[in-house]
Image (cartoon, coloured by chain):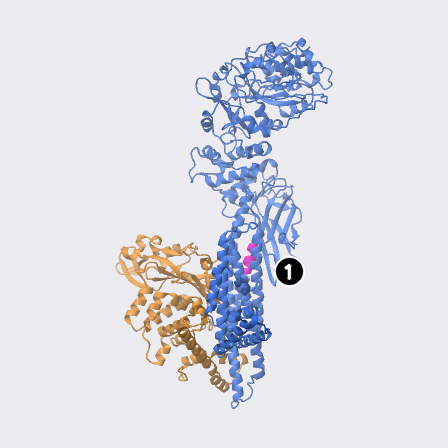
Chain colours: A orange, B blue
Amino acid sequence: MRPRGKAEGRPWLRALEVLRNCPSVIVHAVLLMSQRGRHQESKTKLEISPSETMKAEEENYKEEDKEPKSEDWRPPSVFGAADLKNRAVGLYNIGQTCCLNSLLQVFFMNIHFTKILRRISVPVCGTQKKNNVPYQMLLLLEEMQRGKQKAVSPRELAICLLAHRVTMFVQYDAAQLFLTLWNLLKKQMKNPELVEKLSDLYTIGVQEHLACQICSSETKRNSSMLTLPVPLLDSGFYMLKTLEECLQCFFHPEELTGHNMCFCEHCGKKTPFRQCVKLVHLPQTLTIHLKRFCFGRSAYIHKISSCLPFPQDLDFNEVLTEQQCQAYDSEKAAWQYELFAVVAHSGSTSCGHYCAYIRSLTECKWYCFNDSLVEQVSWDDVKSTYGHSDLSWGQTAYLLFYMKKHPQ
Amino acid sequence: MAQWQEVQQLPPTHLERVHQLYTNAALPMTVRQSLADWIEDQDWQQAAEPFSSHARMLFHSLLTLLGEQLGSLGPGDEDFMLKHNLRKARIDLQAAFEEHPENFANLVANLLQEERCILRRAQAKGQVEAPPAPSTAPQSSQEREIQQRLAEFRTALQEAERAFRHMEDLQDTFDFSYKMYYLPGQDHSHDPQYAQHVQALQAKLQSLDRQRREVVAQIQQLLGRSETLRDFLQQELSAWRERQQRSCLGAPTDTCLLQLQGWFTALGEGLFQLLQLLRAVGELRQKVTYEQDPLQSELPLLEKRLQEQLTCLLQSAFVVEQQPCMPNTPKRPLVLRTANKFCTRARLLVRLHDRNHRMEANIHIDRDPPKTRGFRKFNILTSSSKTVLVGDSPREGLVCDFQYLTLKEQKGGGSGKGSRGSNEGPLAVTEELHLITFTLAYAYCGLELKLETSTLPFVIISNNNQLSSAWASVLWFNMLSPNPKDQQFFSTPPPAPWPRLAEVLSWQFQSIAERGLSREHLQMLAEKLFGSKPSPESALPWTKFSKDGAAGFSFWAWLDGILALLHDHLKQLWKDGLILGFVSRKQEKKLLKVKRSGTFLIRFSESMLGGVTCTWVEHPESGPPAFRAVVPYTAAELASLALPDIIRDYQLLAEENIPENPLLFLYPDTARDEAFGPYYSQRHEGILTKKKEYLNQRLIRVSSRQPHETWQTEEDLVVATEDLETLRLKSGGQQPESPGTVPGGGRTPGTPQAVSPGLQQAVVEGVVLQQAVAAGLGTQQPGPQVAVLPSPQQLGSGSIGVLQTGMGNLGPPVVLQLLQVGPGGQGVLPTGGGAIGPLLGSGAAELLLGNGAVGLLPSGLGDLEGLPLQEPELEAGAVQLEAAELLPTLDDSAVLLDPSDPFLPQPEDVALPATPSLFTADGDFPPLHIDASDFQ
């Protein structure tokens, strides 16, 4: 059922095996056993167990799949936790994967994304299947939707990601992992149409302006971003009060003087510049990255846990001024957003936990995805991720996902 | 109540859903019914997990129990169907789930959850439909939300504990198997049984690992929800703080802490329980750990997060329940006087404590004093530490109650205010804010914390006369300070927005006299302060509120004067809305213009501190309506005579009038006696059978008005006689024209006669006795008066009128211009003096007269020089007035006076020369002749 055994000799695949067979490692860790040979031996034997369970599980599914067909008069609610929770199914934490789990849930709950994901072409051979991130994500999604359990394990996907040199089982920065994941998805989707759709769904278009303050020569450059990394502190290191202020701060022109001066071709020397970013395009799903982790005066990174309220409804036309935008009116008219998901982090920089608050697009209810636990919550619970200056270990919103109200 | 029982009691619509649920379910309702309790007690959710051996065990237990149930049923017919159904169910279940009992577990788990769901919905609906029980106060949605979340938190906690116990079981099983079967030292390569054991061990470890992650996820989730809950409680607490601050300012709000205490305690309990759970989990980790053990990485995080939440909760739960307050000024907390006792109380809302740990609370004053020059330092004289009292009832809670605290200023080093001389600090004493900080060493369940809380800033005064301005500071601070600990607030006090200030001012009246300020009142005050209609942006600077004032006193001093007056003398009238109070002159005219003559209103004086006055309207036959007002009464006057009595007996003396009471109708249109009747001081109904030695006496107030002279508004104090036994007063209600009938009216003894309005007539045994004596304005002090009048029964003396001479300058200008109109209205009586004359005649006896008015006495004095007041036989020396004919009965009154009465005023008691001061030397007054024979 699973292609195995070819891993020998390739170190990263070995790692996969280790992961796959983590229970065996577990036992040995307990025993602090050092005999290599025995390790190998026991490993091969122990491997039987998970695969058998898997078989059993699969059979279960098959059987349950049949059930509704033969007895479709039964209310679906009796069958699976997944149905009860309206397809909000948890993901087991298989070792510091709370960050991955949260991001996956944000992807999966986004119907615009799953529409794209469902259209991917299935890779031909087994290895390709195994190493194809979009395919593995689709498999996981299918498993979640089909699953009658309250949660499923993202093991296959984790293995797949490992194959792409994404380190697993370590503390992750959600913004970084989001970028990695998204890039992998984009790279491995073969269909250019889908790639474009994916880009359209997530990328933000901006125009960078760089103007020499002496000769007024200006260079412009269009670029796209996956997230808007907004600062929580203004240039004077004062806390910003709301998300709107953070956004304004992000689009606020910056004077480059002193050490930051740039070389001007016209003037032929280093001159003070004025740098600013103008907003050109906003995607269907807008990701805002709150830069809560920052370098303090010393070199070590600390987390800003103070309160930053974010609205449920966000209108960029009200937040930004005319000068900060570089877009047509028709584009701007669509800049009406409502909050879709919050990836929240609790703990400190060295040790923390992620969970996701996601508003189901179909039934407009908030859910909290905490690894294997999924719970319906209220907006008040989401608000508790604003942060508290007196709770440095409490949960704070880290990534915000806004959804366009009126898709174009 | 068991869930199945509750389900059965559902209303029909919801019950229908339950039936639907079971129609299609593989579990027949018969089984659910017969094994209800057992089914509800099992953890199906757990059993539904993959790799769970629990499911099989449960499934088989169920089958066995069904078998037992079947066996226990009798052979009777009534059980026949049940037996059949159960048997069938047993066979069906066995066939359907024997292979995969976890499917069965999943099914049952979901069924139970659905049931709960239906129950919840039914309850939620029931709450909306059913009217709230009358005994419980209606809850706000926020309160309901908190209650519900607390309940959910408890349920989730129980679930986590159950998951923990399951994990414990799994670990024990694993531990046992591991010790039994795992023998790594030997070569088992050819032992297939060993391989099986290791495989089983592997599976056990895997399920243990999964369970651990599950428990961790549950605790994460619990912590997440408790953060929301804590946010809610925090909001409620800050709302309470705000309420407390408002209630300190006199607002009528509820500052009870019991509900908050219940909530805080519930959450605290839950979190401490979680802490215990976390510790137990930690112990399990100590026993077994492995690579990628979730507990290894997650536990420290969870512990830190939980401890932080607990710390935060406890810190905020320590509150000052009662702000520092002196017991003798309960309405004005936060003003403390040195050497005076005060009390303050703090409470820990999380009512959890360790009985073995003695908790001690300490207080400090100004722990971090502002670095202001001249900032006074104080010591708390009494003990500053106290053991926290632990009451058993929730009402008591964890309270540290500091009573009988006193403060003493630290002198020395030239730092005190008293000794600082020229280097005076920037702040006045009453703008200097002090704080008391409570600290509490808290320990519970191994958590040790130092909790802290502070009172609101208070003002320390050393003299009672600073109380008023100190209170102004307290008002200003609590109304405007964004930071409740800002001791430097008055270095740059912000201005007060009018709407906010208006509200706070209204509270002052509410708290002191139980009636706040109306919109009209506030309108008038705003116009006074801002000179126009207030806009929402109007703001009053601190100095304008408390320091500067055109009239020589600040706005606050003026208002506080009124408050004091209300509190001491006019509380009831104010409360019942009889005092219009804050009415501008303009407004007052507007109001009265359209009312009939004699309509009056009571308002506060704007020109003097703590004064109240009446203004009435008169409509002359021609010309514009006239408005008249008396010089405001202050606490000094009201102390001797209450305002309702003043109004009842108020007399206006005009030269061509007999005294009359111009106050007929209280604005808008209530007859005077109807409005004020309930407030008149009590009459003593005489007992006819008992011979009374003295006549009663009564104080009345009159104003005199001179003809052809400026209108005199100032009123005089009149001491009026009261009857012995049958005295009835006829006053009010009469038309102003009635005076004309008075003189001629032959009266029957003992029969009360209609007399001019306001003119008090005592009819005693056919005798009308009236006396009026005048004294100079200002010299008439209530104190001496009372002293001189030995007792109410003293002497049948008539009314003692101390009439103030005309001091035109005191009269409001408005009145001046109306002068000509006034007297013209009543021409029947010869002169005003005429009316007074007789009063004086008989009343001359009243010794009060004399109160030292001499200086003010105008001419005319000479006429009275001969007053035989020194003589014991008053009646003999009684005054005969020319006007005596007007009141023929006067003569008789003299009879009452017993010359031999030992209590008759002695000459030394009397300051004789005062008497004639009744009338200014106008010459218009007929000379007073005293003829003793008239009294014989």
Residue carrying label 1: B354
State the image coordinates of residue B299 (x, y, percent, origin top left).
53, 69
Question: In the image, is residue B138 above or below residue A224?
Answer: above
For residue B900, side relative to residue B928 (left or right) = right
Q: Identify the element where label 1 is drawn.
A: loop
Q: Which residues are magenta?
A: B309-318
Question: In the image, is residue B545 above or below residue B841?
Answer: below
Q: Indicate yes or no whether the magenta region holds residue B312.
A: yes
Q: Nearer the viewer, residue B147 or B132?
A: B132
State the image coordinates of residue B251 (x, y, percent, origin top left).
54, 42
For residue B348, side relative to residue A201 (left or right) = right
State the image quarter where residue B797 is shown: top right
The answer, for residue A139, to whether it is visible in the render is yes
Magenta stretch, main secondary structure, is: helix
Instruction: Judge the density around disc 1: few (<14), some (14-19), many (≥20) Cα neighbours within 10 Å.
Output: few
Q: Amino acid at mark 1?
A: Asp
Question: In the image, is residue A187 above or below residue B361?
Answer: below
State the image coordinates of residue B454 (x, y, percent, origin top left).
57, 50
State the image coordinates of residue B187 (x, y, percent, origin top left).
54, 89
